[in-house]
Amino acid sequence: MKAKLLAATCVLIVSCAVAGRAAGLDEKHRITVNGEAVVHAEPDKVTINFGIETWDNSIAIAKKKNNDVMNRALAAIRKLGVANKDVQTDYLAIEPRYKDDYQKRNFLGYFVSNTMAVTIADPGKLEALVEKLLEAGIEKIDGIHFQVTKFKKFREQARELALKAAREKAEMMAAVLGRSIGAATQINEGYGGWSGWGGNRQSMTQNVIQEVPGGSEAPGTIALGKISIRASVTVSFELK
């Protein structure tokens, strides 16, 4: 029994040693590179957040003032063809305020804050929408968010370009050393994402910048720009 156990142990040790040498050989005969790409896509949907704050010593009057402005804003939005489902209340607050909040002294009045979000499918209407909102009495624009509805399509395009970039890089590096590459043995996808046209481009260190053709910035004070959709991969190839 002991002899059989010893023999099995020896076989296991030899197998591990062979596997270790094979793993070491594999490491010596492969090349690992990174590939990155970015695709620029024009936004085809925009969400704008806007709001108004009104106040009065009477809570009913403060709320009526707010409702009046919001009703004018909603009427202007509907004239631009925005559906009711694309308009929603984002935030609503009614509160009394004082000069001395801690002691609740020197009452200033009741303040009504109302914020709404509007989504438009035609970014070209953004300039007109902002103008109409300001004319209606809206005091602040809290944010404008550009979106791409076919994000998956552009992300896949960026991923494909990143893989091509990785292969081109590996081929070039191997050729310089008088070698060539074989099949890919391992593929890992790194961080991807999107940002506006003016976003941080420092992470885009390798190889491809692909722009989707067509379109231009909208006239007026609001530039639509483009959304950058990024992909990053790490690929290992056989080294011949």
Image: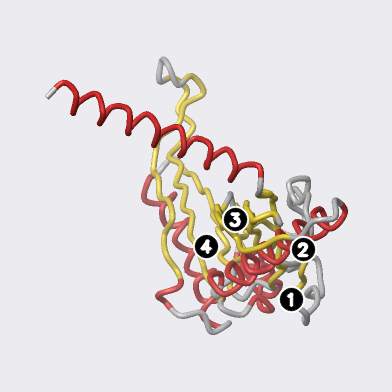
Place of residue 192 in the rendered image (x, y in percent of width and height, measured from the top left):
59, 54
Residue at the spot x=78%, y=82% of the render? 214
Q: CA distance from mark 3 to mark 4?
A: 38 Å
Q: CA distance from mark 2 to mark 3?
A: 23 Å
Residue 158 left/right relative to 176: left
Q: How many marks?
A: 4
Q: Nearer the viewer, residue 229 or 227?
A: 229
Place of residue 218 in the rendered image (x, y in percent of width and height, measured from the top left):
78, 75
- The amino acid at mark 2 is Glu
Place of residue 63 in the rendered image (x, y in percent of width and height, measured from the top left):
41, 53
Q: Which mark is residue 168?
A: 2
Q: Earlier in the sequence, mark 2 or mark 3?
A: 2
Q: CA distance from mark 2 to mark 4?
A: 59 Å
Q: Earlier in the sequence, mark 1 or mark 3?
A: 3
Q: Earlier in the sequence, mark 2 or mark 4?
A: 4
Disc number lying in front (2 or 4): 2
